[in-house]
Image: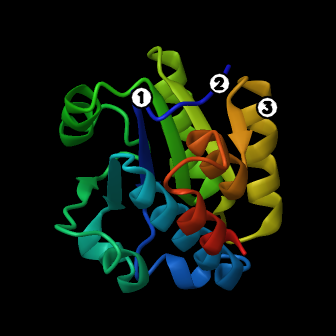
Amino acid sequence: MRITKENTSALFIDFQERLFPAMNEKETLLKNVKILLEGLNILGIPIAFSQQYTKGLGETIEELRSLVPDFAPIEKTDFSCFGVEEYTAFLQHHQSKTIILCGIEAHVCVLQTAVDLKEYGYFPIVVTDCINSRNAISKESAIDRFSYENIMTATCESILFELMRSAKAEEFRAISKLVK
């Protein structure tokens, strides 16, 4: 299946102030997530952010929040984002069918969101270099589960170039500059 810009949106899950510092390889994760976020912005893909229990885990980290005009996260207490009223409204408003997912923690909130989206007829794509957990085994376990559930995975660079489709695309220079 070819991934196109039409009916595609992205969800950035729980990149929060008190959670992010505990992530394994957080510097690499942040670098990749910023590339993905900036690339999706360039391509005009609608983006939502979730925050798990903001009172306890804090706001989305400033490094990401500052890249999003009119930042307005979706508050949740369930681990899955699916079923949260504001997220359902976002999906309907953008007529989303394909959902690009990244976030933390891979084995909890990202996994449960991906499984729920697939179960309800959406096509989730997990960007594996833009997810992580506190330890490597938890991320590896999540990736194994995505495979078991037949949930597509991709890398940041591959998803951006597939959405762009051609070196003739007007966004090509900007995206190429991001991934170098």
Q: Residue 158 versus residue 16: which sits nearer the camera?
A: 158
Which residue is the site of mark 3? Answer: 147
Residue 10 point in image, percent of width and height: 43, 46
Residue occupying the point 47% across, 27% down? 117
Is residue 13 among the parts visible in the rendering?
Answer: no
Kindly report the distance in space between the C-alpha atoms of the residues bearing marks 1 and 3: 25 Å
- Relative to 131, say whether 122 is above or below: above
* Residue 2 circle label: 2
Residue placed furthest toward the front? 168
Classify the position of the C terminus by image quarter. bottom right
Kindly report the distance in space between the C-alpha atoms of the residues bearing marks 2 and 1: 11 Å
- Image position of 112 (left or right of 31): left
User: Which amino acid does the dot numbered 2 rest on?
Assistant: Arg
User: Which amino acid does the dot numbered 3 rest on?
Assistant: Ser
Circle 1 — which element? Answer: loop
- Image position of 97 (left or right of 30): left
Circle 3 — which element? Answer: helix
Residue 100 point in image, percent of width and height: 52, 42
Mark 2 neighbour density, 10 Å: few (under 14) some (14–19) many (20 or more) = few
Which quarter of the figure has residue 93?
top left
Classify the position of the N terminus by image quarter. top right
Mark 3 neighbour density, 10 Å: few (under 14) some (14–19) many (20 or more) = few
Residue occupying the point 58% across, 60% down? 105
Which residue is the site of mark 1? Answer: 6
